[in-house]
């Protein structure tokens, strides 16, 4: 768990004992206490007349939804020896290696029945590396379950109880694209093994990216969480987040906490994404996900001005690889404003929209370039092939040059004019050559590469060294948040780097 606004996957791991401690409600009554006869509940005033009809209506709705949905939410126990990850959830004090070597481990969580063939959607981290999985239904029937498939990039998995199981209560699916902040929701799951627990809250935010699904730092993790203040605790992972129509609109996954328990912020995978993943896992045993082939970053006010946007919106393309985006004419420096008619204003929103599609699907993408909007229709490639391509090493950088350069110490950059050999290698004569990037500097932290050519800074062309020095000095003196640097790399690709402006001493 990460403390100080840490995020915890809402599963719970049990060793040899339960983790929750329950205290007695009250001390015992002394034997010699004198018991008086008193009349309670007699008020000394007349309660005011209150119209509670709306509150009763909401209460009746909660009861109806809970009664309808709770049977479709199951309790999951996944057992293994030495294979299940140990969450730092604030409830355990043990040596992880000793526990892995010496004890049977079990991970407890929740799941939701989504088909009459016994398919259950849950979180991948609930069943990760499990050897045995047990499912307890709300009516106390218990079954062994098998793993159908899982998707690390969304932390989702499908397990299945025997397909012939009769009378399985199946949840109805909603549309998470219709959610709005402020909508009432109920969270249903099994926190601390307290089966069939129902909590209520509202949708606190949409499209959250909390950086917990890193997929081994591959950059392919998909986060577009629904944030809710309905209480979610360890053991709720894989449980249902439902609307007041009793429809599933999210799979509860994580909590933001400093103590390992509920502090008001829970996160759920939207049902539209979960349904896409579930359909693929059931049909193919894997997710067949489309791949656009771009590297992206947020747009801030300075970037918006540099690219000529009237408002801060969209997602900046800072590099275009070999894929559908390149073949459709998308270029580094473009800003994607919409996908299939829906605005995308953060990288995770673009990733989520693409994740709803398969290889070969065509997207309708609204792009901003040079002060104009236009539509392109990229055909998506295959994410699995793209993953394999990322393992291909880039050509090694040449050894650092010993030629003199101008050092921008605040930025950690060394620049000089383009030498004839570099002009031939890059195919350009205009710009400033990046001879040095100092480790730990602002430029280094934001990924700017050595052995590249600076082409523009905040949209201002760099024709020679002095242009670059002037623009960096102006950005430093102006003390705005970031500066947008366009560079040409040795592999002949253009990339954009949004670098935070260093603070003045």
Image (cartoon, rainbow, N blue to C red):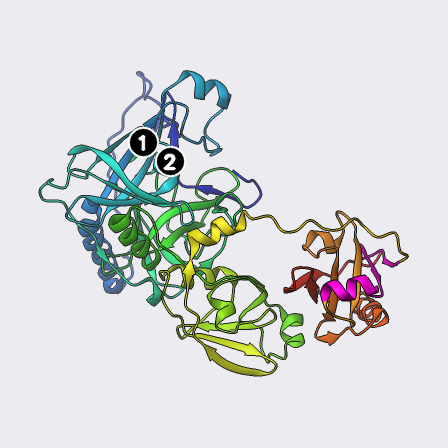
Identify which residue, 381 or 144, lies in the foreground.
Answer: 381
> Which disc, if any, is residue 128?
2
Q: Which badge, 2 or 1, comes first in the chain's sequence?
A: 1
Residue at disc 1, secondary structure: strand
Q: Contact (CB < 8 A) between labels 2 and 1?
A: yes
Identify which residue, 297 or 402, lies in the foreground.
Answer: 402
**In the image, residue 205 lies at what x, y percent?**
44, 60
Residue 255's image quarter? top left
View extreme (right): residue: 404
Q: Which residues are magenta?
A: 405-426
Residue 200 appears in the rendering:
yes
Q: Which residue is mark 1?
A: 78
**In the image, residue 500 lies at what x, y percent?**
71, 60
Determine whether 271 is above or below 100 in the image.
Answer: below
Q: CA distance from mark 2 to mark 1?
A: 8 Å
Residue at disc 2, secondary structure: loop
Kindly identify the residue that appears in the image at 81 percent across and 69 percent down.
Answer: 468
Kindly identify the residue that appears in the image at 48 percent across and 59 percent down.
Answer: 348
Identify which residue, 473 or 167, lies in the foreground.
Answer: 473
**In the image, residue 423 lies at what x, y percent?**
78, 66
């Amino acid at each position: 768990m990460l403390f100080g606004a840490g995020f915890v996957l809402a599963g719970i791991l049990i060793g040899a004992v339960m983790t929750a401690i329950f205290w007695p409600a009250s001390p015992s009554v002394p034997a010699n206490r004198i018991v008086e006869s008193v009349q309670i509940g007699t008020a000394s005033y007349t309660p005011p007349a209150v119209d509670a009809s709306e509150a009763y209506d909401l209460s009746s709705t909660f009861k109806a939804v809970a009664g309808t949905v709770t049977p479709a939410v199951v309790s999951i126990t996944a057992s293994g020896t030495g294979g299940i990850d140990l969450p730092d959830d604030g409830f355990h004090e043990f040596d992880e290696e000793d526990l892995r070597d010496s004890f049977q481990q079990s991970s407890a969580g929740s799941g939701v029945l989504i088909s009459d063939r016994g398919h259950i959607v849950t979180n991948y981290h609930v069943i990760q590396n499990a050897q045995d999985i047990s499912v307890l239904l709300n009516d106390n029937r218990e079954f062994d379950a098998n793993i159908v498939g899982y998707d690390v990039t969304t932390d989702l998995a499908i397990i299945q109880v025997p397909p012939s199981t009769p009378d399985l209560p199946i949840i109805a699916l909603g549309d998470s694209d219709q959610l709005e902040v402020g909508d009432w929701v109920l969270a249903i799951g099994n926190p601390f093994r307290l089966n069939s627990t129902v909590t209520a809250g509202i949708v606190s935010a949409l499209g959250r990216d909390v950086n917990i699904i890193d997929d081994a730092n591959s950059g392919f993790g998909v986060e577009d969480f629904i944030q809710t203040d309905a209480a979610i605790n360890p053991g709720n992972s894989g449980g249902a987040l439902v609307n007041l129509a009793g429809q599933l609109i999210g799979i509860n996954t994580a909590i933001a906490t400093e103590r390992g328990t509920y502090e008001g912020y829970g996160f759920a995978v939207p049902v539209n994404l979960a349904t896409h993943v579930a359909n693929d896992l059931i049909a193919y045993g894997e997710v067949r996900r489309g791949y656009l082939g771009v590297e992206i970053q947020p747009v801030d006010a300075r970037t918006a001005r540099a690219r000529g946007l009237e408002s801060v919106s969209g997602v900046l393309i800072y590099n275009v690889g070999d894929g559908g985006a390149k073949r459709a004419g998308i270029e580094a420096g473009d800003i994607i404003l919409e996908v299939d008619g829906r605005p995308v204003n953060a990288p995770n929103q673009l990733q989520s929209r693409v994740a709803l599609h398969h290889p070969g699907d065509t997207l309708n993408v609204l792009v901003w370039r040079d002060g104009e909007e236009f539509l392109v229709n990229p055909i998506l490639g295959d994410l699995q092939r793209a993953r394999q391509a990322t393992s291909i090493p880039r050509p090694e950088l040449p050894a650092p040059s010993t030629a003199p350069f101008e050092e921008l110490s605040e930025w950690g950059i060394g620049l000089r004019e383009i030498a004839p050999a570099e002009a031939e290698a890059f195919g350009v004569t205009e710009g400033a050559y990046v001879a040095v990037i100092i480790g730990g500097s602002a430029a280094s932290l934001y990924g700017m590469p050595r052995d590249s050519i600076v082409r523009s800074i905040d949209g201002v062309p760099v024709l020679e060294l002095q242009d670059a020095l002037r623009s960096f000095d102006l950005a430093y003196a102006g003390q705005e948040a970031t500066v947008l640097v366009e560079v040409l790399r040795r592999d002949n690709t253009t990339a954009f780097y949004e670098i935070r402006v260093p603070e003045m001493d």
